[in-house]
Amino acid sequence: MRPIQWVVAVAALTFGLVSATASPQSLNGEYKALLTCAKLPFTDAPLDDEPVKLVVANGKATYSRTLYGQNRKTVSGKETGSGKVAADGAISLTGSWRGIKNTMQASYSGKLTGGDSVLNGKHVFNYQGGTYDRSCTLTVKAR
């Protein structure tokens, strides 16, 4: 192989590897996730392994989950949100829920990997005139 052919071959191989690993489309799909959060003062129990649906498509993400009331038995509504996913898997989500008198803001961030991924999050509730924060983790399961 002549030197110029060798350079062209290496360049082609390098470009192929970079474009394959940097493709946001490789993260596309529907993911199952589990949300775990600290107990709030007005709830009967902490939030443990609450199912969350996460969908990634072309660098954008959406998520949703059922939100339960204080006793964890009655449905209060749905937390929904969206965000961006970088080519390297870095993900940032924001979402919310609004009831008749109360609201909740949510944020999660981390990195999607080939295996299970953990995103760190925070909820801020405005409940009966008070503001309450809690930390959360969102464990995204490998597809």
Image (cartoon, helix red, strand yellow):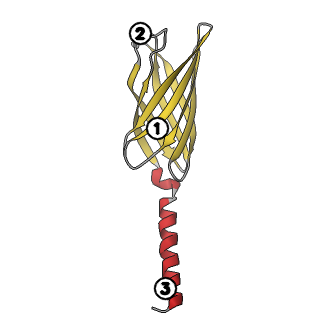
Residue at left 47%, top 36%? Answer: 119
Residue indicated by mark 1: 54
From mark 1 to mark 3, how far is it between C-alphas?
44 Å
Q: Which residue is mark 2?
A: 44
Residue type marked 3: Trp
State the count of labels: 3
Q: Look at discs 2 and 1 and give the one toward the viewer.
A: 2
Q: Residue at x 54, y 88 (%)?
A: 4
Disc 2/disc 3 C-alpha distance (Å): 67 Å
- The Cα atoms of the two marked residues, 2 and 1, are separated by 27 Å
Decide which of tag 2 and tag 1 comes sooner along the chain: 2
**Picture disc at residue 28:** none
- Residue at coordinates 37% horizontally, 46% vertically from top-left? 115
Can you give x and y, in whole percent of width and height, for residue 65 in the image? Answer: 46, 27
Mark 2 belongs to which amino acid? Asp
Would you identify the image quadrant in which residue 138 lies?
Answer: top left
**Callout 3: few (<14), some (14-19), or many (20+) C-alpha neighbours within 10 Å?**
few
Q: Amino acid at mark 1?
A: Leu
